[in-house]
Amino acid sequence: MAQATRVFFRHFSSSSSRFGNIKNVTIIGTGLMGAGIAQVAASTGHHVVMVDQTDDILSKSKANIEKSLQRVVKKKYADNPKAGETFIAEVMSRLTTKTDAAAAVKNTDLVIEAIVENLEVKKKLFSSLDKAAPKHTIFTSNTSSIPIKDIAVATQRQDRFGGLHFFNPVPVMKLLEVIRIPATSDETFNTLLAFGKAMDKSTVNCKDTPGFIVNRLLVPYMMEAVRMVERGEASPQDVDTAMKLGAGYPMGPFELTDYVGLDTCKFIIDGWHKKYPDNPLFMPSPLLDKLVSEGKLGNKTGEGFYKHKK
Ligand SMILES: CCCCCCC[C@H](O)CC(=O)SCCNC(=O)CCNC(=O)[C@H](O)C(C)(C)COP(=O)([O-])OP(=O)([O-])OC[C@H]1O[C@@H](n2cnc3c(N)ncnc32)[C@H](O)[C@@H]1OP(=O)([O-])[O-]
Ligand SMILES: NC(=O)c1ccc[n+]([C@@H]2O[C@H](COP(=O)([O-])OP(=O)(O)OC[C@H]3O[C@@H](n4cnc5c(N)ncnc54)[C@H](O)[C@@H]3O)[C@@H](O)[C@H]2O)c1
């Protein structure tokens, strides 16, 4: 291919798939994950409506996004802080907030749900959104562990339903798992892959199997670390040091459990134990249960396996 044609092709193909038809995105649940997803979607030119239960939560989420953007521009615009400020102002101007989910989806191309890891709560939400959203709107869940098809049954649009599983912290982690259920149409799946690219993520194609790819491997590993401590075989500090220095992981499993949130970890393992009671990899952990019952949920509450500055 001649140089000019190659340049034109690269330019044309990137601009035509820039948004993969997705311009307006609604993100429901703006905690740890939803805020990160909103930040990256707005940073890549999408118009984003953020939905949560109260205005107070939404203002905290916006403040967290602004803090995270400061970290991003510190490096990206190191030589031009003024351009960094302009970038942050532009990104923030693409974010709006609402507490009424049904009203928020009236004009949206894509819904990304990132609320609590609970099947019944997610189904109730999607059932009401199904009545309110336009026909073309694609619905997705960022669930860590719930089968996408179990959530999709709450709607009449299973061909326009899939999974978009982002990783924490969303502004830093490059991976996006794109999940299809048997009913997902090729058009929907391709639009989700294009959207992932427009978000500057590397996508992998996943089937709707437990934990998709990453969590099917990560959850048993993290739970076995907790069980090692329960059996008195090692301390959390030593397990973390061992896995960072001996296996090259950026965080040890206990640092990661605190980072993810112990409540989310418990929701995942309890859900899988209920579904697969005979699988020893998915047995609940008395230590994890105890910490959650004491409100020690990790970084977000100031204490989990470790104490953290809030
Ligand atoms: C039991 C069941 C459990 C199941 C769990 C499943 C959960 C879920 O479904 C899947 C997951 O997400 S699994 C979880 C998957 N996640 C993992 O596995 C994470 C593993 N951990 C890591 O990869 C690293 O420790 C971090 C990247 C978190 C921090 O890196 P570090 O070197 O230790 O510390 P650093 O020097 O501070 O930061 C380095 C750079 O990152 C930048 N930055 C950070 N946060 C930022 C933010 N919020 N915004 C913007 N930027 C942010 C920062 O500015 C800096 O930039 P620079 O340009 O280099 O100066
Ligand atoms: N924490 C992680 O590392 C991680 C990573 C990938 C995926 N996930 C998944 O993402 C989802 C969210 O996890 P998180 O860690 O961001 O949780 P979180 O607790 O930080 O945030 C959840 C947010 O959802 C809001 N919410 C709850 N019910 C709602 C409703 N009915 N309508 C609107 N908002 C509602 C809450 O107020 C809260 O702000 C879960 O399904 C989880 O499994 C989590």
Image (cartoon, rainbow, N blue to C red):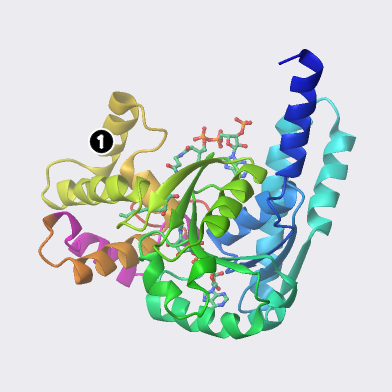
Q: Position of residue 253 (x, y in %)?
A: 32, 43
| Image quarter in which the C terminus is found | bottom right
Magenta stretch containing residue 109, yes or no?
no
Q: Is 88 in front, or is 108?
A: 108
Taking 292 as reference, is 42 above or below it?
Answer: above
Q: Residue under label 1, please give it.
A: 238
For the point 34% across and 50% down, which residue is it?
Answer: 215
Left-right relation of 1 to 281 = right
Q: Is 139 in front, or is 282?
A: 139
Q: Where is residue 3 in the image (x, y as percent from the top left)?
A: 77, 14
Left-right relation of 120 to 86 = left
For the point 81% across and 18% down, which residue is it?
Answer: 4
Q: Give the range drawn in magenta.
A: 281-301
Give the residue type at disc 1: Asp
Magenta stretch containing residue 289, yes or no?
yes
Taking 80 as reference, is 102 above or below it?
Answer: below
For the point 42% across and 33% down, which residue is it?
Answer: 250
Q: Can residue 279 be seen in this view?
A: yes
Q: Is 177 in front, or is 29?
A: 177
Secondary structure under tag 1 reads helix
